[in-house]
Amino acid sequence: MSNRRHFGSVRKLSSGRWQASYWHLGRRHIAPVTFAFKGDAHAYLSTVEAEVRKGLWIDPQGARLPFSDWADAWTATTVDLRPSSRVRDLGYLQRYLLPHFGAAALGDIDHMAVRTFVSELSGTGLAPSTVTKAAQLLAKLMRSAVQAGLLPVSPCDGVKLPRIERTEMRFLTTTEVDALAAAMDVRYRAVVLLAAYGGLRAGELFGLRAKRVDVLHRRVSIAETIVDVGGHLHFGPPKTRAGHRIVPLPRVAAEPLGEHLATFARKPEDLVFTAPEGGPVALNVWRRRFWVPALEAAGLGHLRPHDLRHTAVALWIAAGAHPKEVAVRAGHTSVSFTLDRYGHLFPGSEEVLNDSLDSLVQTARESSERDSRARSRAKQGDCQVPVPL
């Protein structure tokens, strides 16, 4: 007879159903459901015992934690977000996640509940990118719940998100860039040229300090950016490691930048571009006050400041830049991103490939024909009848 001690215990309730409970980590845990049969209660305990032995046990009380409480805890303990990212995530929490899941227990949010959430958000007419970002934030919270031992797996795993159609990029010609620069307020003409030929982002342009500009060697060092978070301007490092870079400049951008520094910047710590009243530039205000009027004066219609960065990449490629060089100048995280985003702009790749294929096939055919003629001549030689002497 086995002396093995059973894990946990079961008891019959007045309702006739069976309740399973067990002790673990100094506390008694009661199964979240009751069972119609005693054997089912023991089977539940056997499953829990196996999870404990394998280190896979999850505290059932954790799964009963309301989603809103976990969202508060996650927000309070997440320290690796930039100010703009934190404001963005809080906005998605308040607008989309908490109204849908706030009162639900973590353990009640299953795979189907997440699919329903994505489907309902999509049905409201929200842009696919917005739905995707909301779902990705939910996935981050649920993965953290798994890591904290509150859930065994994330219910977001495997959920399909809406397809995001990439918007067509707009590129300016060099003539259009010149027209825009000429129409821009003199204080910001170098902004247009730095963006269109150097590929700097708006936050990099308006966070650039005089000490980061090397006019002699025609280059700028990107080590700081500025972002507008809820009307408050924040300086910080570039978002990625690749964003820290030295950008070489053509004369068409370097010389106007040098002239601008001689006129407006006085000390190494001075911002290269400032608001007319002094202090850092708020992008939204600058766009309304200077960008839009310059576009209208140049006759360019709708254009985003970021389209100047796209223009720079297109011009680099047209000038013969290698994808690796484009990625480094632009501060892309990888060459694959550059090729995925701008690969269609690299000139001649289709023609070069097609010409190579044609040459390969032609060479093979000529070789085959030579071999065929050689075999034919050899066969004719074997068939000739010797003439008697």
Image: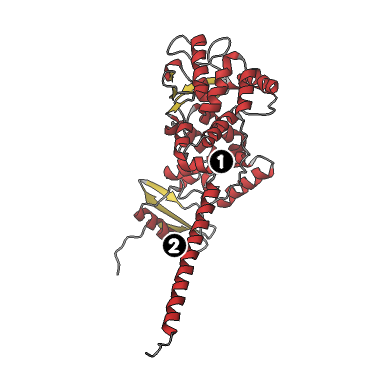
Q: Which residue is drawn at 45% across and 37% down?
A: 333
Residue displayed at 37% across by 49% down: 24
Mark 2–mark 1 Cα distance, whole angstroms, equals: 63 Å
Answer above or below: position of 108 versus 266.
below
- Pointer 2: what residue? 43
Q: Which amino acid does label 2 sit on?
A: Ala
Residue 302 sits above or below residue 64 on the image: above
Name the quadrant of the N terminus: bottom left
Packing grade of label 2 (10 A; few <14, some 14-19, many >=20) is few
Eye-nearest disc, 2 or 1:
1
Image check: 66 left or right of 53?
right
> How far across and how far down the image is residue 132, in percent?
58, 42
- Which residue is painted at 48% across and 29% down in the image? 82
Of 4 and 188, nearer the camera is 188
Find numbered disc 1 in the image and state the secondary structure of the residue it sits on.
helix
Q: What element carries label 2?
A: helix
Which numbered circle lies on residue 345? 1
Which residue is at the front of the view, 28 or 179?
A: 179
Q: Looking at the image, which is closer to me, 23 or 238?
A: 238
Disc 1 marks which amino acid?
Leu
Which mark is first along the chain, 1 or 2? Answer: 2
Crowding around mark 1 (Cα neighbors within 10 Å: few <14, some 14 to 19, many 20+) is some
Assess whether mark 1 and mark 2 are in contact (beta carbons under 8 angstroms).
no
Q: Where is residue 20 in the image (x, y as percent from the top left)?
A: 45, 56
Query: Which mark is on residue 190?
Result: none
Q: Where is residue 89 in the image (x, y as percent from the top left)?
A: 54, 33
